[in-house]
Image (cartoon, rainbow, N blue to C red):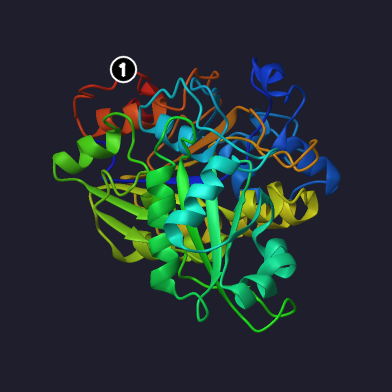
Amino acid sequence: MKFKRIFIIVADSAGIGYMPDAERFGDKGSNTFVHISEKCGGLNIPVMNSFGIGDLAPVKGTTKVEHPQAYSMRLRETSNGKDTMTGHWEMMGINTTKPFQTFTDTGFPESLIKELEEKTGHKVIGNKAASGTEILKELGEEQMRDNSLIVYTSSDSVLQIAAHEEVTGLEELYRCCEIARELCMRPEYFVGRIIARPYVGTNKDNFKRTPNRHDLTISPSDITAMDILKEHGYDVDCIGKINDIFNGVGVTKTQKTVSNIDGMNKTIEEAKNNDFTGLCFVNLVEFDSEYGHRRNPLGYAKCLEEFDEKLAELIKYLKEDDLLMVTADHGNDPTWTGTDHTREKVPLLCYSKSFRHGRYLDERSTFADIGMTILKNFALEPKGIKLGSSIEELLND
């Protein structure tokens, strides 16, 4: 093997230009990275600039530079969708042809809400797409008073249930989410994730979500590169919501995070102190949850710049036989209409201290090239995986 440790960091939603079929999704013209850079007057991201981000799009504040220790390219999405699970699953070899259901515009069907009330014994309030913090301000006091359940969704395929940790209790909230998970396995409601969202506080001015979030997801629809790595005794260390996205399948170790900075600090700690052999797979969700969906391009820009600073810290601890891959799972252009994800290509920046011939590479047709490259690095057969091909330049430099 060329690389002993491979780090994939997913800057959740940091797309870099609309897909050829974006018009079908209402996203023709979107470009998360470029539009953010224009809104903020230019991004200060020297590390990503040194990796070749300037080769991929006219990102204001970046320049085209020689980058012999990094390869830069764009990846197109093969799967039919623009959500978190679809994007991450494709990286590991799965082509999702039928998108997960979303209920952003209408809320969940009355038939589902009625059955959820009957089976949990709680009244349901909310039932709409909403910010998790804003809906607590709106309905938290009512939820406490009546011991009801706040049900809401987003532009992802997700049903979220918020309840007060001390009034409803964690175990009861988790029980209700288990019921929702069972109901939402039916084809007419099929939802990717159920999320328990406990909170504390006494009134709308001080409600705060707690770290006791709990995700109930579905397992990947087919074998993934992670499964193959694990089967052959390699480490698959996951940071952030990767474990939830894959429902624990193919994972050997997981660490939850409370922020992007926390996620990067944990990644740095892995690079510094864990001499593993295999994959460290990281998701940084705040780009998407805090700034993309909330249509805050200036906040997104600051978040990208903070991430770049942490990348500078991380690469100090990378070894000659380490590979760092920085990418995204979809777009979420904060200058675009609505609050939905955007159907975009994603950047792939690949850095190693061992590279000598890094350069811009042609656009590739699927996110799955990431997983196939990892498997080939460890000389593993991609049994059952039909999507993707390895990026030979990374393995032969």
29 or 45: nearer the eye?
29
Q: Quadrant of the C terminus?
A: top left
82 or 183: nearer the eye?
183
Residue 294 vertical placement versus 269 (above, below): above
Residue occupying image coordinates x 61% and y 52%: 152
> Residue 9, position in %: x, y?
47, 47
Residue 17 vertical placement versus 33 (above, below): above
- What residue sits right under mark 1 in the picture? 386
> Residue 160, position in %: x, y?
54, 54
> Residue 167, position in %: x, y?
52, 79
Q: Is residue 8 visible?
A: yes
Q: Secondary structure at mark 1?
A: loop
Residue occupying image coordinates x 62% and y 82%: 201
Q: Is residue 33 left or right of residue 189?
A: right
Q: Quadrant of the N terminus?
A: top left
Residue 19 vertical placement versus 44 (above, below): above
Q: Amino acid at mark 1?
A: Lys
Residue occupying image coordinates x 29% and y 28%: 222
> Residue 173, position in %: x, y?
45, 66
